[in-house]
Amino acid sequence: MSRIILTTESGADLPLDVAMEHAVQVVPMHVIMDRKDYLDGSLPVEDIYEYHERTKKVPSTTATNVHEYEQFFKKIKANYPGCVIIHIGYTSKASSSFQNAIIATEELNDIYLIDALNVTGGLAAIVMFAVDLLEKKPTIEPEYLVEKIEFIVPKSRLAFVPGSLEFLKAGGRVSNLAYLGGALLKIKPRIELIDGKLVSTKKYRGNMSTVSEKLMHEYLNQYDLNKEYIYLLYSVGLDESIKARMTNIAKEHGFENIKWMQAGAMISTHAGPGGFGIAGLER
């Protein structure tokens, strides 16, 4: 029986200790700041916020390239001879990473590629579903595991609200007029993954505490989620009292495992500091 190795990108925001504990291999994406290329994960998110404060710009993010994928997969193959790799990839609708992975594996064997059509906690939820199934059934056939993962992909639900509109404005995702109106009225957009794309689906009005609670309640009422796990996301700067309140709401709804995840560089260029999000899998 060949060993199965699960892989994903840094854009899943999987905490390092979790990835190490469950032997998930993570390939970094890229952050471009001050004309320098940084591997995602090597740059503290606080540096991104400081860069925006100084320049009023947000860094750009780029995909893992073909050569990097080739080296990544070949190294795993060398470390685990005869293994089968199942790669659960960052949405192809928002990055060329998945297409690059396809090109990189054209001449490699025993590698399955799954487009998760999701990012950050939504992607992590799918990865952790695969981890849980593999750990419960270590002799599972790779084809069957792939089938189970592909079935769960459209059931992963992610929504978040940015801490402010500053980063969306700096990244050209909202106009100056919309930014001024939103800032004046304390409006924050609810951003979701729809068919693999980041889409603003609703607007909330109020401070971050009020908005976070509205998002939490509406999300939990909208989706019939598996109660085993829920993933709560934050970007640096979210008030601890808000985190405590969101944890309590999750407990009140009967979730068994509540996992907090810090947004990495990829999503922080959208959310900015003090953002909040939620991800889970529908039943």
Image (tube, rainbow, N blue to C red):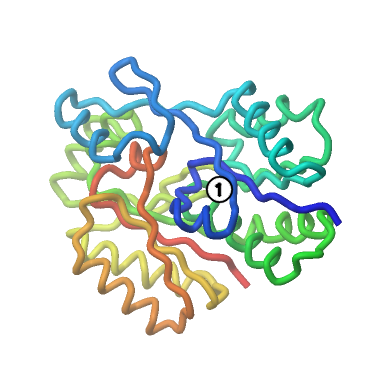
**Quarter containing the C terminus:** bottom right
Q: Is residue 100 visible to us here? A: no
Count every numbered label the image shows and give the total.
Answer: 1
- Residue at (64% x, 27% y) in the render: 71
At a point 54% along the width and 76% down the height, the residue shown is: 228
**Quadrant assignment, res 165:** top left
Q: Is residue 153 left or right of residue 62?
A: right
Neighbourhood count class around disc 1 (C-alpha, 10 Å): few under 14, some 14–19, many 20 upward: many
Q: Quadrant of the N terminus?
A: bottom right
User: Can you give x and y, in whole percent of width and height, for residue 45 in the image?
Assistant: 29, 40
Taking 5 as reference, is 281 above or below it? below
Q: Of 225 and 11, which appears nearest the observer?
A: 11
On the image, which quarter does residue 266 sit in? top left
Q: Disc 1 marks which amino acid?
A: Asn
Corner quadrant of residue 261: bottom left
* Nearer to the camera, 69 or 279: 69
What residue sits 28% from the left and 18% below the top?
34
Query: Which residue is rendered at x = 62% and y = 61% of the image?
Result: 155
Q: Secondary structure at mark 1?
A: loop
User: Where does the image place residue 44, in percent across and percent down from the top left?
Assistant: 29, 39
| Relative height, residue 207 to residue 255 (above, below) | above
Q: Position of residue 125 (x, y in %)?
A: 55, 59
Task: Identify the residue position indicated by label 1 in the image.
Answer: 118
**Residue 205 % position (x, y):** 23, 58
Can residue 190 be seen from the camera position used here?
A: yes
